[in-house]
Image (cartoon, rainbow, N blue to C red):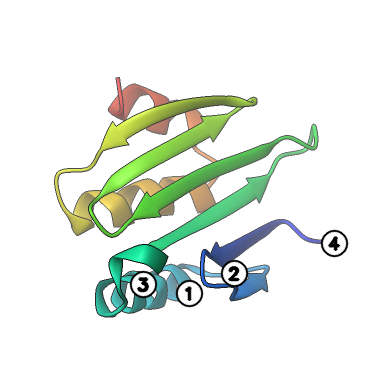
Amino acid sequence: MIENYIQYLGGYNKDNIVFSDIEKAIIEINETDDEHGVFWVSVISDDDFENVIETSKSLDLIITFDEIGTKYKAKDWNEVKELYKLLLEEKFDLIKAQIK
C-alpha cells in the first residue's frame, strides 16, 4: 500500500519515501533550471485524502489538506524541511498553525 510519495515536475516519482528522499529533492531542485524546479510530496491519510506540499525552487509552496490549497512563501530551505518532516509525521494541524 502506498502511504506517501514524492514526484518531480520533470517526471521522477517514488512511493513510500523517507526524509532523505526529500533532502535529495531539495538538492536536485536547486541544481535544475527554473522551468522544472518543482516537486511535491503527498501523504495519504486514513480517509484517503491526499495531504500535499508542493515546493518550487523560489520557496513558493502550495499546501493542500482536505482538498483545500493554501499558498505560502517559506523563509528558507530549513523551514521547508521542517514542514516536510511534519508532513511525513502526519502532524497536519501543526503545519496549518505554522502557515497561518
Point out residue 8 in the picture as x, y percentages from the top left corner: 52, 67
For the C terminus, the image quarter is top left
Point out residue 67 in the picture as x, y percentages from the top left corner: 64, 26
Q: Residue furthest front?
A: 35
Residue 35, placed above or below residue 45 = below
| Residues at discs 1 and 4 in contact (Cβ within 8 Å) | no
Mark before the other along the chain sequence, 4 or 3: 4
Residue identified by numbered label 2 = 17
* C-alpha distance separating marks 1 and 4: 18 Å
Identify the element where label 1 is drawn: helix
Point out residue 41 in the picture as x, y percentages from the top left corner: 54, 55
- What's the amino acid at mark 3? Glu
Mark before the other along the chain sequence, 1 or 4: 4
- What's the amino acid at mark 1? Asp
Residue identified by numbered label 3 = 23
Residue identified by numbered label 4 = 1
* C-alpha distance separating marks 2 and 1: 6 Å
| Residues at discs 3 and 1 in contact (Cβ within 8 Å) | yes
Q: Assess disc 3: are there few (<14), some (14-19) or many (≥20) residues with their C-alpha within 10 Å of its C-alpha.
A: some
Q: Is residue 54 left or right of residue 49?
A: left
Visible in this render: residue 37? no
Q: Assess disc 4: are there few (<14), some (14-19) or many (≥20) residues with their C-alpha within 10 Å of its C-alpha.
A: few
| Residues at discs 2 and 1 in contact (Cβ within 8 Å) | yes
| Residue displayed at 51% across by 64% down | 9
Identify the element where label 4 is drawn: loop
Q: Residue furthest left?
A: 75
